[in-house]
Amino acid sequence: MDNFLIQVTGKKRVVLFSPRDAQYLYLSGTKSEVLNIDNPDLAKYPLFCKARRYECSLKAGDVLFIPALWFHNVISEEFGVGVNVFWKHLPSECYDKTDTYGNKDPTAASRAAQILDRALKTLSELPEEYRDFYARRMVLHIQDKAYSKNFE
């Protein structure tokens, strides 16, 4: 969900990454495996340096808009209080009704991920060379049918 991070007291440093850079963030579920974003292990995470950082500092009274889908890392520079205000901007049927805090993917995205997992399990029945060929063909199909031309 979209989010306002309201810094009431104290200071925070916030680093944002665009959803377009997801392929460089080494995602495991909804989180990045790169924990030290200021000094990443580039031997382990060589593509991380390609991710474009948007960084700011928040002090008491500041408000930061964090758009839905943007990855963020927040570091408290001193003791403080921050308040997050989330809101839904998609039609209500797009959201899991049990998701009080907006942490779950939209229901259509969750269903698509489940279908993809089943497809990958099915591909695992093939010999490696065939599995590789058909997986690459599926990726091309996804790129052709689902990637937006507006963000290239």
Image (tube, rainbow, N blue to C red):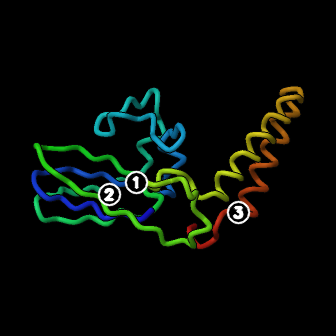
Left or right position of 65 against 58: right
**Which quarter of the rendering shows the C terminus?**
bottom right
Q: Residue 40: percent from the left, percent from the top? A: 36, 33
With respect to residue 78, does 150 lie above or below? below
**Which quarter of the rendering shows the N terminus?**
bottom left
Name the disc covering residue 17, or none: 1
* Residue that label 3 marks: 146
First of labels 2, 1 by sequence position: 1
Q: CA distance from mark 2 to mark 1?
A: 6 Å
The residue depicted at 27 percent of the width and 60 percent of the height is 5
The residue depicted at 51 percent of the width and 53 percent of the height is 99
Left or right position of 82 against 31: left
Name the disc covering residue 54, or none: 2
Helix, strand or loop at label 2? It is strand
Mark 2 vs mark 3, foreground winner is 3
The residue depicted at 33 percent of the width and 39 percent of the height is 37
Q: Residue 43: percent from the left, percent from the top? A: 44, 27
Q: Residues within 10 Å of mark 1 (few under 14, many from 20)?
A: some
The residue depicted at 75 percent of the width and 62 percent of the height is 144
First of labels 1, 3 by sequence position: 1
